[in-house]
Image (cartoon, grey):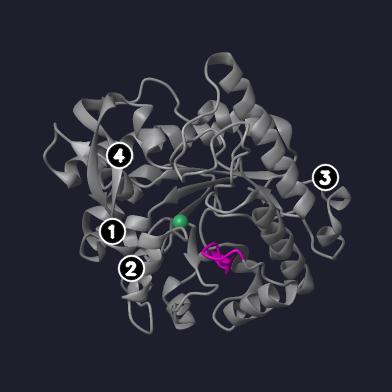
Amino acid sequence: MWRRCEDAEEMGQALTGTRSLASSTVTLATTIAGSLPKPSWLASRDQLWAGWALDGDELAEAKRDAVRVAVAEQERAGLDIVSDGEQTRQHFVTTFIEGLEGVDAVNRATVRIRQRYDASVPRVVGQVTRKDGVFVDDARFLRSITDHRIKTQVPGPMTMVDTLQDDHYGDRETLAMVFAGILNEEAKEMEAAGVDLIQFDEPAFNVFLEDVPGWGIEALERAVEGVTATTAVHICYGYGVKANIDWKRGLGPEWRQYERTFPVLAASSIDQVSLEIAGSRVPLEVLDLLGDKSVQAGVIDVATDVVESAEDVAATIEAVTAHMPLDRIFPSTNCGMVPLSRQVARAKMAALAAGAALLA
Ligand code: ZN
């Protein structure tokens, strides 16, 4: 199902190895979890979920220009599967929710999300429906500007219900299933637009562990029903912001949250799991719980400005190979890179590609 990448050999030095790019036997195709920092001409860089620097037609044009830059930088770094770097989104969850009917994005509420920090979120005020594609046009645009395989990200249903104020449904599970149906429509339209890999961002799966085997996985299954593109779920320990760093400090010497969710995912229809490894305290034997799933292995730590060497990246990938064959490993970043500087993000992408190339 992967799109052949004819011009890959012309891309950066990291692609001069012997990897075959022609089929699903491709080994070590690299990608990023999703977001990249935005240029200062698009959004202010002084806060994580900063407002846009432009509006109207100028903003629309600037977003597309930023996507062009994000794609060029991923290709230049030597990455194989590229995304739009989420340049059109203010927030990876709320921007999607705000694209739906039945949502008040103006009279917002402040709620505690992921049991960790307060965020300004939209309110659900009526029956939620999807009138048009939310990120489908973005996916079409991405498809039109690169010959590489492409991925898109959407929030997962559990993470969505944890990133809003519900003034209508009164029940997380019910609302999650509504979102799941909407995500399924979105995913099918993305697939029709030529997206190779559709990723559901579910950091909430690392927090509400008791609900994952029940309505958490049911909602995710509903979201991928009938989708033939490769599907992935991204479960991480968050960006390198203070609330997350404090939370991780309290998780003990070994982070075993994946131990609870991976057996559930192994039995699911999801093709791939994106997980955090580099710089984390995740014991790698949890990978043994994933059955025949493939992984986007987080070999780049997004919680530090220190740039990994190619050897660091290769060593992390090698550690993963003790639990999984190379052809099921897609080296990636732990999470989105939106909080980093553009310079650091570029260097980390280059390290990712160069490290994977050492094992090609
Ligand atoms: Zn993440």
Q: Calculate the distance from the C-alpha at mark 2 to the C-alpha at mark 4.
A: 20 Å
The residue sitting at 68% across, 45% down in the picture is 149
The verdict on residue 206 being magenta is no
- Residue type at mark 2 is Trp
Q: Residues within 10 Å of mark 2 (few under 14, many from 20)?
A: some
Q: Nearer the viewer, mark 1 or mark 3?
A: 1
Q: Calculate the distance from the C-alpha at mark 2 to the C-alpha at mark 3.
A: 44 Å
The residue sitting at 33% across, 45% down in the picture is 222
Q: Read off the residue under disc 3.
A: 6
Mark 1 Cβ and ligand 1 under 8 Å apart? no
Mark 3 or 4, nearer chain start = 3
- Residue type at mark 3 is Glu
Is residue 259 found left or right of 88 in the rendered image?
A: left
- Element class at badge 2: helix
201 in relation to 29, above or below: above
Q: Read off the residue under disc 4.
A: 120
The residue sitting at 49% across, 69% down in the picture is 292
Q: Read off the residue under disc 1.
A: 116
Mark 1 or 2, nearer chain start = 1
Q: Looking at the image, can residue 63 be seen? A: yes
Q: Quadrant of the C terminus?
A: bottom right
Mark 2 or 4, nearer chain start = 4
Stretch of the chain drawn in magenta? 295-305
- Element class at badge 3: loop
- Element class at badge 4: strand
Q: Read off the residue under disc 2.
A: 247
Q: Calculate the distance from the C-alpha at mark 1 to the C-alpha at mark 2.
A: 7 Å
